[in-house]
Amino acid sequence: MMEHRDHDRVPRQDGYWPETIARWEGEGLRGGEQTVRTMLRRDFAGLCWSWPRPFPGRSELLEEDEQTRVIIDGFGQKTREWKSRSGTPEHLGWECDSPRKWREVFRPALLGTGLHVSVEESRKGFAEARRRGAWCHFSGVEGFEATRKMLGDEMSLMAMAEDPQWIRDVSAVHTDVLLRDFNALWDAGVHPDGVWIYGDMAFNHATVCSPAMYRDLIWPDHKRLADWAHQHGCKFIYHTDGRIHAVLDLYVEAGFDCLQPLEAKAGMDVRELCPAYGDRLAMFGNIDMTVAGTNDREKVEHEVRSKLAAGMATKAYAYHSDHSVPPTVSWETYQWIVELLDRYGNYA
Amino acid sequence: MADLNALKEAVIKGDRAGATKLTKELLAAGTPPKAVLDEGLVAGMAVVGARFKKNEVFVPEVLIAARAMKEAMTILEPVLVKAGIKPAHTAIIGTVQGDLHDIGKNLVAMMWKGANFGVVDLGTNVSPQRFVDAAQEHKASIVGLSSLLTTTMPAMKQAVVALRAANVTSKILIGGAPVTQAFAQEIGADGYAPDAASAVDVAKKLVTT
């Protein structure tokens, strides 16, 4: 699919909220998420998850109430999170609050950490994934997300405008540590088909920063990651939420092979993107979960069928929800989506 | 001599030292504090908001502009208070119950402050009753409800129902990644804003209708 060449069917992958699986179990699902994965016939297998942090394993409980707890984590980030449900945490503060703190404490701490992945686990996962013929990939988080985690949104975004060298350095050091993980796995004989990097660079209406600022501060490290992938014979998938039209050409220039998950509610639409970029970028996802959440069979069929058609015309499309499947989607609807993939997702 | 246009430009550029210095100079020269606010600081943020809406500037530039205004306000605010000048409208804002997401909500609060709304930020995971209590206590013109998750959109409806049931007269504005104009109409909100800059325009329109 990422070679834009003939293949038998649209590859598939998806993600589910824990609450979604719980809902589906109440609606007749037996065997939990494993059953859903088997039914979907997932084609991708992650071999690691590298999100380097300066203080691995740190999770200090500061306070808690019935529903939430406040912790300081391995990024030096103070958050309030739910105890028993998924969802974005509330951000309460960051220990890395100055360039000096970064230089003197966080930078050396991050560089001084060991591997953030398990070689043994990755080896096992690799062998298992190869046995079942899955497309194997390393997964990790890129530099912009790292700055937000360590510095907080407000400080990192203001520093992008006022102290760009600080942000360049955080992103570059993070990328060095990430690539150290990937190199260690590679040297241990874990040779994937791709590298799948996560980083959210956009909101619903635009990218977080200007394309020029992205090109200057973050893009060089994105290119380093894509180059690493290509030098090792791998494809490069980039995950970002939000509306990213303004930076698509920069993604092409950096050598990205595939974009995921293409958030429909942010205005991303493979029916427009594939004719324009489908010869250079594979598209992965974009099935609108607000449509799926209507649980209306006709609407869902139109959504899946029309987007499959647009993607398959380029031979460079893989199925995924446009982020992850929320619990507004019924079990019956999800089974309908899989049936539609079986019906319309074959090239033969 | 400092002029209001220079102050406006300082805010647009996010020049906090310049904005603070010019505010002091303008006040010392006898410029009416209301003019410093409206024609300098608020006017600057209005330009930033308009450019943000058109994707001519992005969140980093908005944040440094808002910070320049905030720092200048530390000089101006006591003078405004002394002169008995208050924001014409108070806005309550919060992320609805069940949702801890705060980035979008914070950005809207910042833009509203930049447009000289008095802003009471209730934080995240706010119950319908807290919205009601705060709207009544502060005699709010606007209540802003934020949600990131499709699963917490029903909590928006519960907040709207509670506000209406309590006969709160504030206009209700909703926003957040999964929210749409159609959803706003469906739950009986008065307005919907797709982004932080639009939230200023919609709020201004709502408080004058």
Image (cartoon, coloured by chain):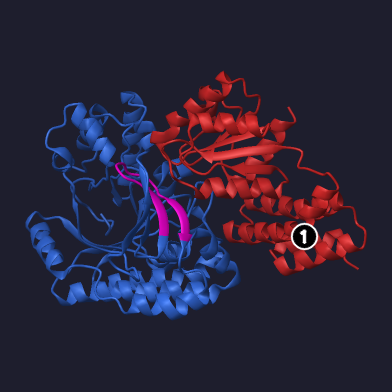
Chain colours: A blue, B red
- Magenta stretch encompasses residue A89: yes
**Residue B130 location in percent, x, y?**
53, 33
Q: Quadrant of residue A105?
A: bottom left
Does residue A188 appear left or right of residue A303 in this picture? Answer: left
Residue B99, position as x, y percentages in the image: 43, 40
Q: Relative to the observer, which residue lies in front, A201 or B60?
A: B60
| Residue appearing at x 21%, y 76% in the figure | A184
For label 1, the SS is helix
Looking at the rendered image, the quarter that the C terminus of chain B falls into is top right
Q: Quadrant of the N terminus of chain B?
A: bottom right
Vertical placement of A186 versus A24: above or below?
below
Q: Is residue B131 magenta?
A: no
The residue pinned by badge 1 equals B75
| Type of amino acid at the residue the image marks with label 1 | Ile
Residue at 53%, 51% in the rendered image: A206
Expressed as whole percent of the image width and height from the top left, the position of residue A98 reads: 52, 72
The reply to whether residue B53 is visible in this rendering is no
Q: Please give the range of residues in magenta.
A: A78-93
Q: Is residue A205 above or below residue A23?
A: below
